[in-house]
Amino acid sequence: MPARLIDSFGTTDAFAELFSDSAVIDAMLRFEIALARSQARLGMIPQSAADAIGQVSSLDAGTMARDARESATLAIPFVKALKAQVGGAAGFVHYGATSQDLLDTTLVLLLRGAREVLANDHARLTQALRELSERHAGTITLARTLLQPALPTTFGYKAAGWFGAVVRSWRRVSAAFDEALVLQFGGAVGTLAAYGDHGLDLAAALAGELQLALPAAPWHAHRDRLASLVSQCGVYAGCLAKVARDIALLMQPEIGEVSERGGGSSAMPHKRNPAGSVVTLAAAAQVPGLVASFLSAMPQEQERAAGGWQAEWPVVACVVQSTGSALAALTSVFDGLTVDAARMRANLDRAAGAIGQLDDLERSEQYLGAAEALRRRILEDTE
Amino acid sequence: MPARLIDSFGTTDAFAELFSDSAVIDAMLRFEIALARSQARLGMIPQSAADAIGQVSSLDAGTMARDARESATLAIPFVKALKAQVGGAAGFVHYGATSQDLLDTTLVLLLRGAREVLANDHARLTQALRELSERHAGTITLARTLLQPALPTTFGYKAAGWFGAVVRSWRRVSAAFDEALVLQFGGAVGTLAAYGDHGLDLAAALAGELQLALPAAPWHAHRDRLASLVSQCGVYAGCLAKVARDIALLMQPEIGEVSERGGGSSAMPHKRNPAGSVVTLAAAAQVPGLVASFLSAMPQEQERAAGGWQAEWPVVACVVQSTGSALAALTSVFDGLTVDAARMRANLDRAAGAIGQLDDLERSEQYLGAAEALRRRILEDTE
Amino acid sequence: MPARLIDSFGTTDAFAELFSDSAVIDAMLRFEIALARSQARLGMIPQSAADAIGQVSSLDAGTMARDARESATLAIPFVKALKAQVGGAAGFVHYGATSQDLLDTTLVLLLRGAREVLANDHARLTQALRELSERHAGTITLARTLLQPALPTTFGYKAAGWFGAVVRSWRRVSAAFDEALVLQFGGAVGTLAAYGDHGLDLAAALAGELQLALPAAPWHAHRDRLASLVSQCGVYAGCLAKVARDIALLMQPEIGEVSERGGGSSAMPHKRNPAGSVVTLAAAAQVPGLVASFLSAMPQEQERAAGGWQAEWPVVACVVQSTGSALAALTSVFDGLTVDAARMRANLDRAAGAIGQLDDLERSEQYLGAAEALRRRILEDTE
Amino acid sequence: MPARLIDSFGTTDAFAELFSDSAVIDAMLRFEIALARSQARLGMIPQSAADAIGQVSSLDAGTMARDARESATLAIPFVKALKAQVGGAAGFVHYGATSQDLLDTTLVLLLRGAREVLANDHARLTQALRELSERHAGTITLARTLLQPALPTTFGYKAAGWFGAVVRSWRRVSAAFDEALVLQFGGAVGTLAAYGDHGLDLAAALAGELQLALPAAPWHAHRDRLASLVSQCGVYAGCLAKVARDIALLMQPEIGEVSERGGGSSAMPHKRNPAGSVVTLAAAAQVPGLVASFLSAMPQEQERAAGGWQAEWPVVACVVQSTGSALAALTSVFDGLTVDAARMRANLDRAAGAIGQLDDLERSEQYLGAAEALRRRILEDTE
């Protein structure tokens, strides 16, 4: 179990597990076992060696993290530990592969797991938003611009706006996952030269074993697919944060139009805080800087970077976990959200009175037909 | 002409013009004229008013930038200046529209222009990379990992790697442009209420006038499309910077495998600097932080933000211009790049000698067949 | 006049002028003239040459920005243009200096000008905040945590909190200016070798001419002083934005405790927007990403960077201008801020009623003595 | 022990321990115990309660991280767990304090521990750099600008440049620690109202117990001190990365002027990688984006933020750990660095030959006196 207290809002139990030491080692093992199995099938190593490697079901992380610093790669202590477990098959472990084949594919496998969790929560959130929008299709409320009351809208249209942004952004995340979840396999310098004429066959076999797509070529120093994924997570997290900010603002008692089930206060028992929105905002706030870190590291030297690549793992893991944490928190907000339509109406009336423009307000309220049409367009556009 | 000396590498003449004061005013005018024309066609305003508005071909920026600060929106001084030009039609200017309709659509129109310039340069760059890769399909060179000599590869495969990343990233930029280049039109709070039952008809007519796609709904506070565009520019710029870094490293005289036509030095006339690569790197280095700025501004309050939206224009304009500047600089690098195949061979031999592993090197050189197959896969994948 | 419309909130007239093309050329000229004058005094070049160079009072920016891209340095087209103006003294222009001596010192001179403008506005802002705090030392108001009403405080203490953060942060900015405003002068590779035994004498003379401090050594590839300045501007801008956010929130009509003179709306004439706060937030939002850009560029290669250094000018200029724009906007907010003490009282009473904890509230109100003591501590601490 | 494999280069054993769950709980306990003790001394709570609280020497993190998400604060599950351990004294735990008093002071206590580790490694690094500079005061080497050979310098001067930047930056970090390591204590809304007339006495007593300075006032929503610390760590890390980049470039075999003891390769046993430099670069690359995250979160709402504050812990912890990891890695580089003065000489001669400017080179070599003077100025300036 990772250190969690220093970052309570940056991950969830599920995500912490997905990027835990044991999950990392498990994914690394999967790569090496699949590699050995593929190589045995192609006659590159003895089947007995592949069998021996395939027997290893876990390794102790031990001092691997520390040892990784000595060689600037986790692959070296890992392969060493693995070799120590397989007796005579040691010489066939990681055969012809390079550190980055192992580590990038490991990251891809971890991301595949994360995608599932994200997809599940996303489905829950959008379902909740769609229902909220439908339920409040006719709930008149005050639109606010620059934090000032403006004119009437419907709460259903407002919820549809949230829905549309979240759905569009997830589509991009999903497409970016499709592109990024590909095998990394190129050998020392990406030429597959160690495998003579059989490099591409082996790559295809390995991809098959791991059920990963095979890209046109290895991508050791070309990080655009991951960069796109990380960036689209940033866009998605930004959309989640926008919803959370709206909720937190609407939940100000002076406005009081919605209310989270909320959390308490250690000093003021009477308080009801927008806890889920706050966690969403706190988690999402991590992401933009991390996206910049990833993009800044893209100019990676020649066939393998001296620093930029090695900076990626924690960035990607944090982006995904923070996004997932924000998503989980926001989903929980909508599990228990109370909408106060009467208060919305009262706020609208008060605003109309204050600004002496009842006519305008009434007219626009009367013409909320377009808002309803737009609301339906959003829900249909993104089904 | 904008202030250019403080940012000589952040834009080009073409991009500076595209985002100049006159270009901004021209795009703003196009919106208002198209709006009036559409409204006249739908009988919302007199045709004569639309004609009067349509006569205005330019406005003086004057103190608009300063005045914009008073109201936190450029739309107000602009609309005021426009009204002053149209006599009796003043009451029909900007009718029913909101600041953000005008300003967001203006940005979209500017971006449409920028896309063309980017696309042209991108086509030149990828053509050059493709040719370079073909020409050097058989040029053996030393691959380097962590800045250390590793094993042989071909320069053609290396160029194909650059090509593939740039092409994939451009596809994403292009798809993001497709999504982002849509009309913004919703009226005061995005409901089109000012237009009664004809809001959607007007929106469609306006989109047609401006030859922009009509999105499902206005997107005043939902910035995901722009965020995706900005982010994908960041990924693309990162790929350009990676190529530039490689060139600058290969051009070190101690390596000397390629050479830019290059630039001079004010203190050392004998020097030949990787000027194009340096400009590429300098321009691209601007982008990641700007992407973070855009993403950080996404949690925009309710129906229109108090700060986040207003922060976007310079960020988007800088991202696009910096990306364009990096692209132009890198394209010029390949216009005059010299490749020294003999030096590549010599460096390879020297590395082989130094590490006493001639056998390994020879073997992998002999098996560069896979590299050639991978090279072709990349070129075919991305045609 | 620079392109301003695309970035109306990112600078002010004063700052735009400070970083305009003519200001840049003027500062560059000051360096070259001071260099020539110092060299003449030390007998390194003829006095007549220094006189000829000293006659040049302006140069046309012309195509310098474009030409700078060819050589990756603005110094080359500038020096060329200057030489063309001085006839026979051409051979003595920029003698022994390097591009970066000229360009870094130019930036320092520009920053010295910017510091003055910032300092003036800072003085106005803190004066306003101090007065506000004193005036409302006894104005009871509702403190809010997580956007929820909490317990009483005084508006004077709240204003003191703003004051304290702004004052502390400016002290750090000011100290960072002290460190950063130093001469850059090292010749081609920072050794002053071109000047034989007289390099340090020349450096001291040049520093004297320009009234800049002389650092221990040139800092061509060591950017920590500028990095610290840029970062501290980021902290300062963050403090300004915090105040602006508070104002914008307190100005929500549902709360209505303070009010900016404010700006209008193009679609809703009845609205009064927190325009100054919005501009403050929009301007300040630019800065964090730019700080990251600067820091990311710090690993500059050997004696002069290939990309990182060349990325700095626009970053520094934008940071300073955005900070200055935020400061000017916030200062204007306090020029016209209305404080509604009655509304504060009413909100407090309503909150007390709503939460059924009148006792608690009354008790804490009664004990606001500590708040007053803390308020005075802040004002005294930072005088 | 935290999850380390996903972030092997982002922390060290020492730092991982400093921010571990048990370290966090220990610091939280220290706060609560010191608070109780101070309150007992002032007669606010019974001494027996303080004694009971003081008995608690550890708490199980259990599900605290998860529970923290419910209330958006770790303080609530922690205080609950603590109360469960102290029987009848439960009512006196955390008396009158607020979540943020506990959590901010906890962070400060953790940072105090981190500062010591950083200071120790910094001392080792600067000692190594000073010695290196002295040892090579007379070692002539080739300066390089824009990655191109320029003119001679000395390796001692180069090392002094590294030394100067690192020392200056540490001074700023150290000053920022001095400012940031202060007590947070204000009660629910920062007024100390719960303690009647004794709030400031209690604050002073608590500061004394914890051996922390007492600031002028609580700083719940004013984060400039931490922001300055985080930013200065960013500057410092940037300086470390610059040194690492130089080493990695000089260690290219084609240049071969220095050599790390280095690390191996999983695919190429012959390789010797700049492992320490790579880890330094990878760790330092995390920091700029995190600095932006911190600065972006500074506009914190009213008396306690809804999101921005809650985002800080992982950012601060990552900045400090990444900086510490970079520092540890770079320190180890200099423990085993080999300098090849003969190769430096050979590279210089070859460069001179290639550019046909032996005269220039010889002259500048002859005049390296200024470089030596500058070198000494740096070492003296920063003692």
Image (cartoon, coloured by chain):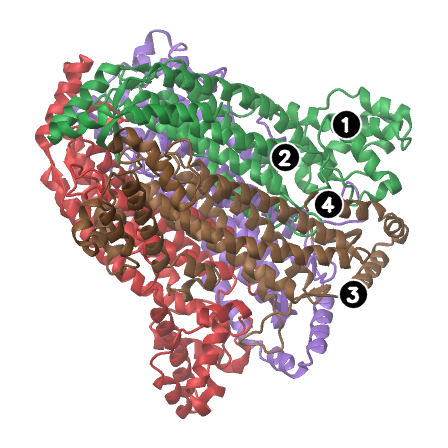
Chain colours: A brown, B green, C purple, D red
Res. D229 image quadrant: bottom left
Q: Residues within 10 Å of mark 2 (few under 14, many from 20)?
A: many
Which mark is on residue B180?
A: 2
Q: Which mark is in front, 2 or 4?
A: 4
Res. B317 image quadrant = top right
Q: Residue furthest top?
A: C88
Residue to which mark 4 is pinned: A380
Callout 4 amino acid: Glu
For the residue pair C318 and C111, the one nearer the viewer reads as C318
CA neighbours of label 1 inside 10 A, class few (<14), some (14 to 19), many (20+): some
* Label whose residue precedes the other's in the sequence (4 or 3): 3
Query: Is residue B9 in view?
Result: no
CA gap, disc 4 and disc 3: 29 Å
Q: Can marks 2 and 1 be said to lie on one chain? A: yes
Please determine whether, in this image, residue A151 is positioned above or below residue A197: below
Q: Tell me the amino acid under the disc marked 1.
A: Gly
Q: Please state the horizontal and vertical placement of residue D346, each as a whole percent of the image.
A: 11, 24
Q: Check if mark 4 and mark 1 are on a common chain.
A: no
Distance Cα–Cα, label 3 vs label 2:
36 Å
**Label 1: which residue?**
B208
